[in-house]
Amino acid sequence: MDEIVRLFPEHIKDAIQRKVQDRWTELQEIRFRLNQPIELIYDSKIDWIHSVKPESQDGIFVLNQLSNFSLYRMEDELREGYITIEGGHRVGLAGKVNTLGGTVKAIQHITFFNIRIAKQKINVASPIIPYMYKEKYMNTLFIGAPQTGKTTLIRDIVRLIATGWKDIPAKKVAVIDERSEIGGSIKGVPQHNVGIRTDVMDACPKAEGMMMMIRSMSPDVLVVDEIGSKKDVQALMEAILAGVVVVCSVHGQTLEEIKKRPSMQTLFQQNVFKRFVLLEKNQQPGFVHAIYDEVGINLLQKKRSLNHGVDRSTSIHRYHNVDRV
């Protein structure tokens, strides 16, 4: 975790290391607010460091570490409200915003930092991917609230499709990584293992990136995180009409809720998705609550029913969990 602790001045670094000790694998976020205790968010609990409260000079130190003492070179990232650092970790920023013509020009007086710790879970999607394949990969939508593990699951799905699994050969995968979360790229180079046949369009708006990748990289499978706008949906439809399989995620609590969203209507009217993976908000992120087919049958329940109603813990959510990054 050297790339994380280097962000902080020595007295804060020491306090964090003393508090976390050997629990780095459980740590999801470090929330650093000026003049407030430091908040540590773990998989199953929240802890605090009250011994130090960051001051303005500490915030300046963190910004200098993030930007290598050159904030003007990171204007685009600052406008988006986050910076991705080595290791694929993402630092969210908040403070006073300057606007121009109704749009964000820059975040000024940055006083809130959220260091979201990236963790790759190799093979965490291995129990899920067989449900997405039936002679070929099927269009799949992952549904879940924030911090339910959508991105980590999708990252491993990308790796498996692009590398191959069991006797299923590798496919060409195009990832549109608008927020640098799937690949965690630095200068265009993914920091996570996304497979040997994956091409990543980093920090690019989703709709434009999908069209660019279809034209330039001829993917078999297109992967995009957190769709939502009508432009995203239009681009997805273009990809599908071009014969490309799509795997994507959306914020939501239930499949019924997603079906009611106006921006998603076209996708449901055209019966685009053949699989829906619903993630459950629980103490630990990544519990798979259900995997639905296109007619709404929960394939996990169907599998349990084949075991004559005996619950042999075959449900994925009983023993597989991941962390959102």
Image (tube, rainbow, N blue to C red):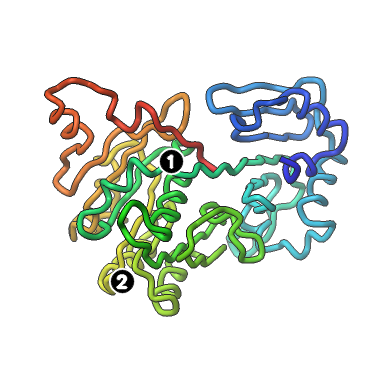
In the rendered image, which residue does mark 2 sit on? 238
In the rendered image, which residue does mark 1 sit on? 124
In the picture, which quadrant includes the C terminus? Answer: top right
Q: Nearer the viewer, residue 101 or 50?
A: 50
Circle 2: element type: helix
User: In the figure, is residue 174 to the left or right of 169?
Assistant: right
For image coordinates 83% across by 29% down, the residue present is 14
- Residue 109 x %, y %: 77, 47
- Residue 47 x %, y %: 65, 21
In the picture, which quadrant includes the N terminus? Answer: top right
Circle 1: element type: loop
For image coordinates 58% across by 59% down, the residue present is 190
Identity, as a three-letter code, of the amino acid under mark 2? Glu
User: In the figure, is residue 165 to the left or right of 273?
Assistant: right
Alpha carbons under labels 1 and 2: distance apart: 30 Å
For image coordinates 31% across by 57% down, the residue present is 168
- Residue 233 x %, y %: 33, 62
Q: Give neighbour class at mark 2: few <14, some 14-19, many 20+ (Cα, 10 Å).
A: some
